[in-house]
Amino acid sequence: MLPRAKDSTRPVTLAPSGAKCGECPFAVNGCPPHRPVRDEIPEKPLGVLVGEGPGRDEAEVGRPFVGMTGQQLDEELVRAGLLRSRLAVLNATKCKPPLDAGIGEKNAALRACRPHFDKVYGPLRHLPTLAMGKLAWVAIDGKGGSVETARGFLRDRLIVTWHPTYAFFRNPWEWGNFAVDLARFARLIAGTVEKSAVLDTKPSVETIRRFGNFDWVAVDIETRPVGDDQPWTGKDPTRARLRTVQLGRPMFGCAFPWNYRHRREAKAFTKLMANPKVLKVWCNGLWFDLRVLARFGVEVVNVADVRDMRRAVSTTSRLSLRYLTSIYSDFPPWKENGDEK
């Protein structure tokens, strides 16, 4: 990528504290191309909004989110019961990128601004934070990822969502999802998020037997490939090896490894699966899970599979159970931290 031409006639603009403007592809003579957009931090902020970078209006005024996107964002904040004046508003980068800027240049600009962002966000890191856009997420944790798969979950004090410009104007289908995330952000600030379900990862035999007292129980399994040289076999019910088993009821669940050290637990689970009085609720169980269990000597009776039901519920949205459950609960993302292991 060719370096951008430097304009020796541009007036020198002071760099934000800590920023390495000399390493930024958008800098002019090692200085910001315009007056950097300032951070807005009230005396006692209740939460933090983090955007990716300023647009034209923000670059002209020197304040974050003052253009069309900012005006709509203010309205959405009010609908969620929040006041912008009580929130810290930051940007991952301080200057407006050129319209033809590529993702590589934007990432370079992000790295150049990162020391300044860390200095400003560091004292606020304990507050509920809404990361609006991928670059905002990268600025916060240094890694980031796909917003499409990240949004909808609560990560400690952090919520990742779409950038409001994308949600409001480029893909209005995501407007509702942005509003859902903003409402969760408001609940996080108010301290009214749902309590996470209790997951017992070392259940006793008595705990497993307790599920037999209910008229239904949710069941899931995790599998692993036959060997490292054939990783795809983990998704093949005729060959996959059974790794863990999970049982669930509202607000309580248990999970345990399927191995010889847990033979008593495995026997209790097998007996529960054969109990005709307990309905076993699966998602994709008829197509996958039950076939795996049968190979390991576990026969299941009285089964209900919600795979088609969730498709009916989500005919115009993503079909993953991970996505659907995230919208309706404030729980942390399942499997993201290796929970199933």
Image (cartoon, rainbow, N blue to C red):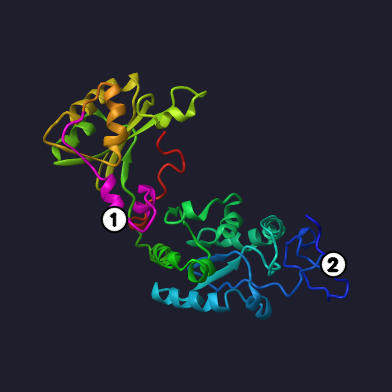
Judge left or right: residue 333 versus residue 286: right
Judged from the image, the secondary structure of the residue bearing numbered disc 2 is loop
Classify mark 1: residues with Cα within 10 Å, few (<14), some (14-19) or many (20+): few
Residue 323 lies within the magenta run: yes
- Residue designated by label 1: 313
**Identity of the residue drawn at 58% across and 78% down:** 66
Q: Quadrant of residue 211?
A: top left
Vertical position of residue 111 compared to residue 197: above or below: below
Residue 3 is a magenta residue: no
Q: Nearer the viewer, residue 90 or 308?
A: 308
| Residue bearing the label numbered 2 | 6
Q: Residues within 10 Å of mark 2 (few under 14, many from 20)?
A: some
Which residues are drawn in magenta? 300-326
Q: Quadrant of the N terminus?
A: bottom right
Q: CA gap, disc 1 to disc 2?
A: 55 Å
Can you give x and y, in whole percent of width and height, for residue 295 in the image? 29, 22
**Spot occupied by residue 251 in the image (x, y as percentages of width and height):** 27, 48
Residue 203 shows in this picture: no
Question: Residue 38: where, in percent of width, then height?
Answer: 65, 73
254 with respect to 231 (left or right) = left
